[in-house]
Image (spheres, grey):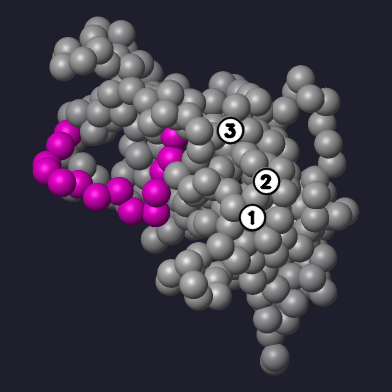
């Protein structure tokens, strides 16, 4: 499959990334330090897209372009037909939820308070959270199986529990598009699988469009509908995991000898090829 994903019917497309490029430079008179070249893909409600690639391949830059935090140098990112970077911050926060690699706590908070904070795009002036906001926050915790953590302090829960709470916080925004940057970082394998299974279930049930940046090849291959494979700022291939996970291509990108096997479900599994 080419670097441009197959086109879906226009009425079925929620997120459309169209020949997007970007460049970082120390100042306008110097050559770019990094360039993300024309990248395209489309995603529908209920789909999970994984952005894969080694460090400095452009994954986080692409995520920022999708979120609207960066304006493309060329091309465009459309969410339900509207350019994401042109949305005002309040409108963007009602449509797009972003989960960063690290969520810093500026002051101690209980889990329910932390989740409730993400209702601010819907607040009216200086008014306190409404009864509806509280119910939505509680429902978000229920959706990720974290109701029992409601009154716990954030600094007293495990890494896996915290990631579920952070996901619930994003869901409280009631977004159309959910963007996650390395959500399984620092989690053990059990917590990684739990989180990806929850993401897949929520995407299907609530018709979220989900974009995940990750280094975890097997998790991406097991839970995503599409993969965008980046290398040195170039989109090398876009498509279902089975079409992207070609041994020679992955070895070229990750500079490691690998084996790729297809399981009974048709999902690829990648292993490092041992010298012994």
Residue at 69% in and 85% down: 274
> Residue 103 appears at what percent x and percent y?
30, 48
Q: Residue 154: name its quadrant.
A: top left
Residue on which the image places disc 3: 83
The residue located at (38%, 31%) in the rendering is 89
- Counting every numbered tag in the picture gives 3
Q: Camera-side residue: 262 or 184?
A: 184
Query: Please, is residue 217 above or below residue 6 in the view?
Result: below
Magenta part mainly helix, strand or loop? loop
Separation (CA) of disc 3 from disc 2: 10 Å
- Say whether marks 3 and 2 touch (CB < 8 Å): no
Q: Are marks 1 and 2 in contact (CB under 8 Å)?
A: yes
x, y percentage for residue 223?
65, 45
Q: Nearer the viewer, residue 271 or 42?
A: 42
- Residue wearing tag 2: 75
Q: Is residue 131 magenta?
A: no
Residue at position x 51%, y 38% in the image: 85
Q: Is residue 72 left or right of residue 13?
A: left
State the extent of the magenta-drawn residues as a range.
97-110
């Amino acid at each position: 499959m080419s670097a441009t994903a197959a086109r879906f019917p226009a009425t079925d497309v929620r997120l459309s990334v169209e020949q997007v490029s970007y460049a970082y430079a120390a100042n306008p008179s110097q050559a770019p330090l990094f360039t993300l070249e024309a990248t395209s893909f489309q995603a529908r409600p209920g789909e999970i897209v994984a952005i894969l690639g080694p460090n400095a391949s452009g994954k986080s830059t692409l995520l920022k372009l999708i979120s609207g935090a960066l304006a493309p140098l060329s091309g465009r990112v459309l969410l339900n037909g509207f350019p994401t970077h042109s949305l005002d911050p309040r409108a963007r926060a009602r449509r797009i939820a972003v989960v960063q690699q690290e969520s810093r706590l500026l002051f101690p908070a209980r889990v329910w308070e932390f989740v409730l904070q993400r209702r601010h795009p819907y607040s009216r002036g200086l008014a306190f959270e409404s009864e509806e906001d509280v119910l939505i926050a509680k429902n978000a915790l229920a959706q990720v199986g974290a109701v029992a953590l409601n009154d716990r302090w954030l600094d007293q829960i495990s890494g896996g529990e915290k990631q579920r709470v952070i996901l619930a916080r994003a869901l409280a925004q009631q977004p159309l598009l959910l963007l996650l940057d390395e959500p399984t970082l620092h989690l053990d394998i059990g917590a990684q699988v739990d989180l990806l299974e929850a993401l897949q279930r929520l995407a299907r049930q609530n018709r979220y469009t989900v974009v995940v940046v990750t280094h975890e090849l097997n998790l991406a291959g097991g839970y995503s509908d599409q993969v965008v494979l980046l290398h040195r700022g170039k989109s090398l291939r876009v498509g279902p995991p089975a079409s992207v996970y070609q041994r020679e291509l992955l070895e070229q990108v990750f500079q490691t000898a690998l084996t790729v096997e297809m399981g009974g479900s048709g999902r690829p599994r990648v292993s490092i090829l041992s010298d012994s």
